Each structure stands twice: as structure tokens, then as C-alpha cells.
Image (cartoon, rainbow, N blue to C red):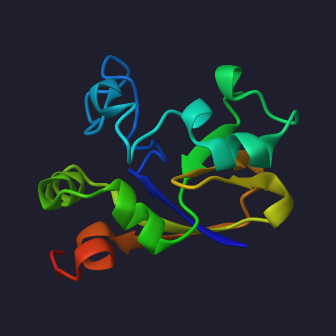
Amino acid sequence: MKIYRVEDADCEGMYRRADEKENTLINDEQCGRYNHPTPTRDLQLKYSCGDRVDLNDLPTDYLFGFNSIEQAKAWITEDRWIRDLHTRGFHLVEIEIPSRYVYIGDTQLIFLNPKVESRIKHNISEALCGNNES
């Protein structure tokens, strides 16, 4: 299955607690917005996980991502975020993973990172807004 994730060269995501990583762009202040719900507020994600994964205490082997480029665009709605992510070295990463390790929500998904089969980095500006900023 093909999924997408925004991450830097260390495979760290963009959505971290503000005190966890200096390179972070989107932090807890955006958490809970209608297009940035916490995992427990994404009802489809809760349904998808069922009792297999506790979204209130997510194991560190799980990472967040998107089901499609369109879902990523719906999450990253501001052009300035895309520019800042690009400047900070983030990419849109295309990930291949068996579907049984992916739980899909309305706005985001989670996946079991150790089960990733491949990662291909794409220029985030080009992928999300068609700009060619190398």
C-alpha cells in the first residue's frame, strides 16, 4: 500500500511537541483544529484502530501520515507552512507498507514504522503546490 508522510532527513515528522525538536514547524498549538484533530478526535481513525491500537497511549513504533497527497494537502493548508517545511529540509515521503499495518482516518493515518518496505523522498513544494524549489 502507498501512503505519504512529511518528514526530515532523520525521519522525524513535522507534527511534534514544540519542546521535542527545534526543527518542528507544526506543534501542539495547532492540535485540535478542525483539520488537525488529535488522533482520538478523528472518528474514522478510532474506528479503524478498534481495540488493536490505543490512540491515547500510542506506541513509539507508530508514526502518522496520510492516505493520499490530497489528504496531506488538506492537513497542510497554508503555503507558508509548505515553504517553511521545504526550507527546514522536510520532504513528502512516499512509503510502501503492507496495508495490514496501516490504520486510516478521515484526516490522517497511523502506520507501524518497522514494517515499512520502502521510502521515496519528493520535494515537498513540488508535491504539494507544484512549485519547483530545489
Residue 116 lies left or right of residue 79; in this view the side is right
6 versus 98 height, above or below: above
Where residue 99 sits, quadrant-wise, is bottom right
Q: As rendered, which of 97 and 33 lies closer to the eye?
A: 33
Label tally: 0
Q: As rendered, which of 95 and 110 lies closer to the eye?
A: 110
Q: In percent of the image, x 38 and y 23: which residue is there?
A: 17
Q: In percent of the image, x 53 and y 60: which residue is there?
A: 66
Where residue 32 sits, quadrant-wise, is top left
Q: In percent of the image, x 87 and y 36: which residue is there?
A: 52
x then y, percent, for residue 86: 22, 59
Where residue 97 sits, quadrant-wise, is bottom right
Q: As rendered, which of 62 and 118 lies closer to the eye?
A: 62
119 versus 43 height, above or below: below
x then y, percent, for residue 116: 72, 59
Q: In percent of the image, x 54 and y 52: which residue is there?
A: 108
| Quadrant where the C terminus is found in the figure | bottom left
Residue 3 lies left or right of residue 81; in this view the side is right
x then y, percent, for residue 127: 33, 77
Q: As rendered, which of 128 and 77 lies closer to the eye?
A: 77
x then y, percent, for residue 60: 66, 29
Q: Furthest-top residue in view?
A: 19
Residue 1 lies left or right of residue 9; in this view the side is right
| Quadrant where the N terminus is found in the figure | bottom right
